[in-house]
Image (cartoon, rainbow, N blue to C red):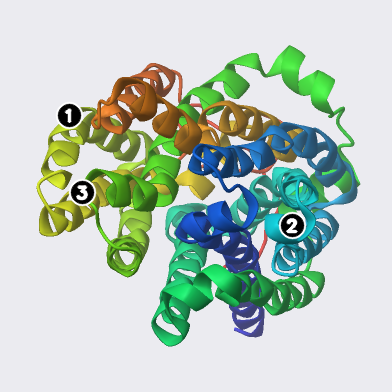
């Protein structure tokens, strides 16, 4: 009984530490999205200011593959815990530093250069943050409840977005629009520092993943990026294709949407922030349900439902969004609920694509390269395409195209529900169980 209780406490700590780190990471992205208009005025004044601000968002993703190439192999060699504790400190420090930057009116061109530099640091640290958190949590959870517990990592993702949006909304209501443009936009970025310290404390007191420990102590397999790209090409490409769909939808809905609605239907800053907050809270509430459901029906059916649903309903919902604020909220919630089956199962699906000795590196490489190309650039691509063509439904068409790419990758996704992640073989529920040693789980 004591072993079971100890395992339950350890699992809850692992979930909390992973989710807290993820929340800190995405708190920054939520704040950046919600403060786009203020950042544009502070750092990129001029007729193309919004476009440059979106470029500032996208540039952090260019360093994510490099971060993944550094942190991923380190995580497979040194362990998940030490890398996760380091990356969250880097992320929080860079985010907090944005809150004390001088503006363009104070130091001229140096202001946007400093902003971009800090976004680069964020991108580098994030390259190891997300893949490591998902890998650690997947390896710590019970095999039969990996979907449910893994969904709380994404609960942290949306919690970061919601927290960022809520803080910005609170600042808007308390200090007013003029003060937000002057100095109020700094407050949300500064809040990331204590959040990061809490996440670091939780992570530094975790035990190492038992799956990693077992392989490191007994098998000593050859890992590294070379092993990933030469032996596990199918797995990397499958992951990358799914991430195209995942992140084009994610960064269009959760990052570009405030700018889109302000420009297309003239929603005010506070109204847009409130709408995003409502939609994200709804998504958060249903995440554990979809995670638990995936433990019953499998990961592949969840992804199929989501990809097909988004491909069919993206254009109609964006058309409705152009009809007014009420329809914008409805369309956002519908697309958000169609997207949640992907979001809820990331942590149970993606780490399970790879065997233990290359799991962190494989996840970090495939995820971050695809995210850098198709995820962080989504707001920039959407903004540029609408500016060039005047077609306000382009974001929906972009989401449809990305979902079709995801459907191709889905064909090569192995089902891993209930399958052990231990050992050095690729997990596959159709190939039988991998022999493992006994461990206590909740």
Give the residue drawn at x 33%, y 61%: 276
User: Is residue 182 rendered to the left or right of residue 124?
Assistant: left
Tell me which numbered mark, 1 or 2, is placed earlier along the sequence: 2
User: Is residue 201 rendered to the left or right of residue 286?
Assistant: right
Tell me which numbered mark, 3 or 2, is placed earlier along the sequence: 2
Residue 282 occupies which quadrant of the picture? bottom left
Crowding at mark 1 (Cα within 10 Å: few <14, some 14-19, many 20+): few
Residue 402 occupies which quadrant of the picture? top left
Image coordinates of residue 155 in percent, x first then y, are 46, 63
Q: Residue 281 bears which disc, if any?
A: none
The residue under label 1 is: 312
Foreground pick, 321 / 110: 110
The image quadrant where one finds the N terminus is bottom right
Q: Element under label 1?
A: helix
Instruction: Give the label, 3 or 2, closer to the camera.
Output: 3
The residue under label 2 is: 210
Please determine whether, in this image, residue 435 is positioned above or below residue 289: above
The image quadrant where one finds the C terminus is bottom right
Image coordinates of residue 302 in percent, x first then y, are 31, 40
Give the residue drawn at x 66%, y 45%: 131
Crowding at mark 2 (Cα within 10 Å: few <14, some 14-19, many 20+): some
Image coordinates of residue 88 in percent, x first then y, are 75, 62
The residue under label 3 is: 265
Foreground pick, 115 / 6: 115
Report, in whole angstroms, how far the alpha carbon at label 3 lies from the one at label 1: 23 Å
């Amino acid at each position: 009984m004591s072993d079971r209780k100890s395992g339950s406490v350890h699992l809850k700590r692992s979930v909390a530490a992973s989710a807290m780190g993820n929340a800190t990471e995405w708190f920054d992205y939520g704040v950046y999205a919600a403060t786009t208009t203020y950042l544009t005025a502070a750092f990129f004044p001029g007729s193309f200011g919004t476009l440059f601000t979106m470029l500032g968002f996208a540039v952090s993703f260019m360093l994510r593959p490099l971060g993944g190439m550094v942190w991923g192999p380190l995580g497979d060699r040194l362990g998940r815990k030490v890398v996760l504790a380091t990356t969250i400190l880097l992320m929080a420090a860079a985010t907090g530093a944005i809150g004390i930057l001088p503006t363009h009116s104070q130091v001229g061109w140096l202001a946007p250069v400093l902003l971009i530099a800090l976004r680069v640091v964020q991108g580098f640290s994030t390259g190891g943050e997300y893949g490591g958190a998902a890998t650690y949590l997947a390896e710590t959870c019970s095999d039969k409840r990996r979907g449910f517990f893994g969904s709380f990592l994404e609960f942290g993702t949306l919690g970061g977005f919601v927290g960022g949006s809520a803080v910005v909304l609170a600042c808007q209501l308390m200090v007013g629009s003029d003060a937000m443009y002057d100095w109020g936009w700094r407050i949300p970025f500064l809040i990331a520092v204590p959040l990061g310290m809490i996440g670091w404390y939780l992570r530094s007191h975790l035990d190492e993943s038992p799956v990693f420990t077992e392989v490191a102590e007994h098998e000593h397999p050859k890992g590294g990026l070379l092993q990933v790209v030469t032996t596990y090409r199918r797995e990397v490409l499958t992951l990358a294709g799914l991430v195209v769909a995942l992140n084009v939808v994610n960064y269009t809905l959760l990052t570009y949407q405030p700018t889109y609605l302000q420009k297309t239907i003239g929603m005010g800053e506070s109204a847009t922030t409130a709408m995003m907050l409502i939609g994200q809270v709804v998504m958060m509430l249903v995440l554990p349900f979809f995670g638990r459901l995936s433990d019953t029906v499998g990961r592949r059916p969840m992804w199929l439902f989501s990809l097909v649903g988004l491909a069919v309903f993206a254009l109609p919902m964006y058309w409705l969004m152009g009809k007014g604020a009420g329809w914008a909220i409805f369309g956002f919630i519908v697309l958000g609920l169609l997207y949640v089956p992907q979001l809820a199962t990331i942590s149970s699906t993606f780490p399970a694509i790879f065997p233990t000795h290359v799991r962190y590196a494989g996840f970090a490489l495939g995820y971050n390269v695809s995210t850098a190309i198709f995820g962080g650039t989504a707001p920039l691509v959407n903004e540029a395409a609408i500016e060039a063509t005047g077609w306000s439904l382009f974001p929906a068409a972009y989401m449809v195209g990305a979902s079709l790419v995801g459907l191709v990758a889905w064909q090569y996704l192995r089902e891993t529900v209930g399958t052990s992640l231990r050992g050095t073989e690729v997990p596959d529920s159709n190939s039988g169980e991998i022999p493992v040693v006994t461990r206590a789980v909740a």
